[in-house]
Image: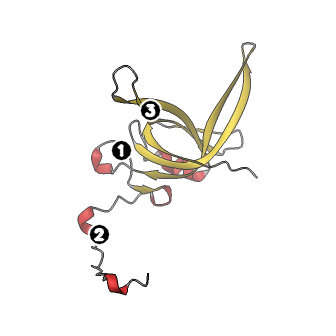
Amino acid sequence: MSINRVLISGNLTRDPELRSTASGMPVLGMGIAVNDRRKNPTTGEWEDYPNFIDCTMFGARAESVSRFLSKGSKVAIEGKLRWSQWEREGQKRSKIEVIVDEIEFMTSRDSGSGAGGGSASSASASAPRAEDIPAAPEITVYDEDIPF
């Protein structure tokens, strides 16, 4: 058995590029920077090291999502890895990219980056404000109620 699932969150490194296949299927390409924290052995300080990841989304959702994203938008992505290989000027090249199944916008429209707040399925809705979310009911637990 093998599992090919990827979960990442980061910021778009460039504006998404929407194009189409020969058959007319929309294809959205985007780059995402995901930071990794490592301790610098020389200074002993923790530092961020970016990883740049190419992501591709297909279909009608790709076209819809493209209208809400721009460079700098923070997103969370779930998908799978895909390896591809080609030849350019006699040299073999390859890359691994993430094929996006689900995307969630983590930047609100009010932040000025042009991203929507919510998931791709509700891309036109903005994220709820904290004061609009009802508080959870208070629950009191007594130690003598616990059976162990």
**Nearest the eye: 134 or 16:** 134
Mark 1 or mark 2, which has the lower sequence index? Answer: 1
Q: Position of residue 117 (x, y in %)?
A: 38, 54
**Nearest the eye: 66 or 22:** 66
Q: In the rendered image, which residue does mark 2 sit on?
A: 133
Q: Quadrant of residue 137?
A: bottom left
Residue type at the position of mark 2? Ile
- Residue at 29 percent of width and 43 percent of height: 112
Q: Position of residue 84 (x, y in %)?
A: 71, 32
Q: Residue furthest front?
A: 148
Is residue 63 shown left or right of residue 22?
left
**Nearest the eye: 126 or 144:** 144
Q: What's the distance in space between the residues labelled 1 and 2, CA to CA?
A: 23 Å
Q: In the rendered image, which residue does mark 3 sit on?
A: 13
Q: How many marks?
A: 3
Is residue 14 shown left or right of residue 101?
left
Q: Quadrant of residue 134?
A: bottom left
Residue 102 tag number: none
Q: Are marks 1 and 2 in contact (CB under 8 Å)?
A: no
Residue type at the position of mark 1? Gly
Task: Identify the secondary structure beneath mark 2.
Answer: loop
Q: Are marks 2 and 3 in contact (CB under 8 Å)?
A: no
Mark 2 or mark 3, which has the lower sequence index? Answer: 3
Q: Residues within 10 Å of mark 3 (few under 14, many from 20)?
A: some
144 w.r.t. 72: above or below: below
Residue type at the position of mark 3? Thr
Task: Identify the secondary structure beneath mark 3.
Answer: loop
Q: Position of residue 65 (x, y in %)?
A: 49, 49
